[in-house]
Image (cartoon, helix red, strand yellow):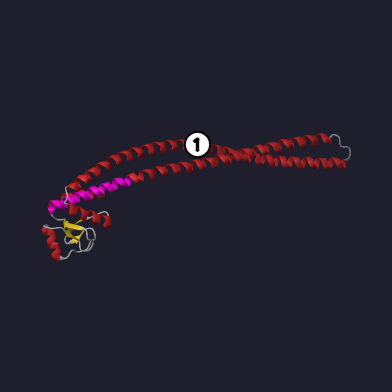
Amino acid sequence: MKVQIKKLIDLQNCDSRIADVKDKKEQGPIKIQELEEGLIAFENKLKDELGRLEAYKQEGRKIDREIEDIDSQIEKSNNKLSNIKSNKEYSAALKELDELKRIKSLSEDKGLNIMEELEVMNAGCVESKANMEKLKNDVEKNRDKIMEEIKVLEKEFKRLEKERVSLGKSIEENLLKKYDFIRERKGGIVVSPVIKGVCQTCHLDIPPQQFNEVIRGDKLMNCPNCIRIIYWGEDESFKDDAAAGENVKE
């Protein structure tokens, strides 16, 4: 029976490796999607920055046109002054001219503020564009790397599946059915060591009489608590198999 238990442990280790490889394979497309979503988010951020930059440029051009229009009005007002005869009209024209100059000054101040903002925003967009190119290159490299890893994992997965079939053929049919039955219901660990009278999976005590039978190892035993197949973990003949299983879990 010990020989069959050892084969079950080997099968369990193989199943653990298969599960690990399958999980890593499934993580690959998720990682690629996360990379692409990050790139899209950055692209949208850059579009927003460029949109704000263009809006400021349009505002700057609008103010330039306003200043040109005011300059034209000021020129007309100056020409008007030379033709005015009465003091009252002259005072009114001067007041109108002063108001135009005041509005022009406000527009010029606003235009200067926009120019300063444009300088900062343009520098930010230049930096964002450079970061965008770097991010594109990084995403492409990481995508290629993940795709290569998936190919390697696919080969390993197929190899392990063949190994599992081979292991299954070396195990008694009724024992293999029992293993698969427990695995379907419990998942993960099917064959559990018992150390110092305690099942190492459910961590509950095995009754003394049953533990003695586990130590003898002359028949198949199940944990009365978790129904997993159990064996004496302190038996030297099982220690290498148990250590291999621990390495798979890590």
Would residue 1 be found to the left or right of residue 99 on screen?
left
Query: Does 243 appear above or below 74?
Result: below
Residue in the picture at 77% in, 37% down: 73
Residue in the picture at 35% in, 46% down: 27
- State which region is magenta: 1-24
Q: Position of residue 140 (x, y in %)?
A: 41, 36
Q: Is residue 143 visible?
A: yes
Would residue 62 be found to the left or right of residue 91 on screen?
left
Residue in the picture at 27% in, 42% down: 158
Q: Position of residue 5 (x, y in %)?
A: 16, 53
**For numbered disc 1, what is the local secondary structure?**
helix
Q: Nearer the viewer, residue 161 or 40?
A: 161
Tag 1 residue: 129
Q: Nearer the viewer, residue 79 or 209?
A: 209
Query: Does 44 appear above or below 238?
Result: above
Residue type, label 1 = Lys
Q: Residues within 10 Å of mark 1 (few under 14, many from 20)?
A: some
Indicate whether residue 40 is drawn in magenta: no
Q: Position of residue 43 (x, y in %)?
A: 49, 40
